Amino acid sequence: MKRKLSLYSMIKILIIVAVAVFVGVFTMNLFNIKLVRDSEIGVSGVLTEIKQISQLDTVEMYFNEILDYREAIKINDIQIPFTEKSFIFVVKAKVQAGIDLASLSEEDIRIEDKKITLTLNKAKITSKEILEYSAYDEKDGLFNRVNNDDTLKTLNEFRVRLDKQAIDSGILTKAEDNAKLVLSSILRLMGFEEIVINFSD
């Protein structure tokens, strides 16, 4: 008898719960009530997300150059005959550019509803790397032989010129354009609909 009563009570409770859920759903639809999770992203939250990236390298450029090295022994600007040494140098290098996000502060972020404005430092060259080099057609001069110092001198001069070559090729502009694309994608995922990114010195 107790068992039947217990089973009956359970069925009764299930029916009451089902009716309550139905009434709740019906009432929400009737009055067009929607449950919405409203979340806001503050400046500090955006700053934390962006700073996790830290250094945003967005462009790589490769350079191949042929260098013609010549040097001779001179006295009072007069070249001594047969002392000229020379070689042809082939160099391959890689240059990277990007945006330093570590210096970003809360003052550089402005949020108005679903619009965000970021002010970032301008792009800069972040690394230079000589990938490979080879010397060809080496010619020694009298008492003036080609040596390792000549190789190092040529590579150092090439490194100095590499910055200008990369900048003249538009590496910094491309780095800023790519940074805008990457950061805009992240900020859209965070819920922002209008994104403005500026660069300053």
Image (cartoon, rainbow, N blue to C red):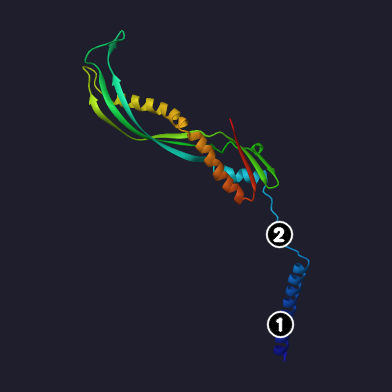
Q: Badge 1: few (under 14), some or many (20 or more) residues near its Cα, within 10 Å?
A: few
In front: 3, or 114? Answer: 114
Residue 179 can be seen, yes or no: yes
Task: Name the residue: 62% across, 43% down.
Answer: 47
The residue under the point 58% across, 44% down is 50
Q: Is mark 2 on a helix, strand or loop?
A: loop
Regarding residue 52, the answer to whether it shows in the image is no
- Residue type at mark 2: give it: Val
Q: In this view, does 25 lie to the left or right of 83?
A: right
Q: Do the residues labelled 2 and 1 touch (CB within 8 Å)?
A: no
Compare marks 2 and 1 and give the one earlier in the sequence. 1
Single out the mark in the foreground, 2 or 1.
2
Q: Name the foreground residue: 180 vs 153.
A: 180
Left or right: residue 152 compared with residue 183: left
Q: Which image quadrant is residue 118 in?
A: top right
For the residue labelled by badge 1, is the local secondary structure a helix, a strand or a loop? helix
Residue 42 rendering spot, x and y as whole percentages: 68, 46
Residue assigned mark 1: 10
Q: In this view, does 132 lie to the left or right of 178?
A: left
Q: Where's residue 147, x and y in %?
A: 27, 24
The residue labelled by disc 2 is 36
Where's residue 169, x and y in %?
A: 45, 32
- Figure quadrant of the N terminus: bottom right
Q: Furthest-front residue in view? A: 169
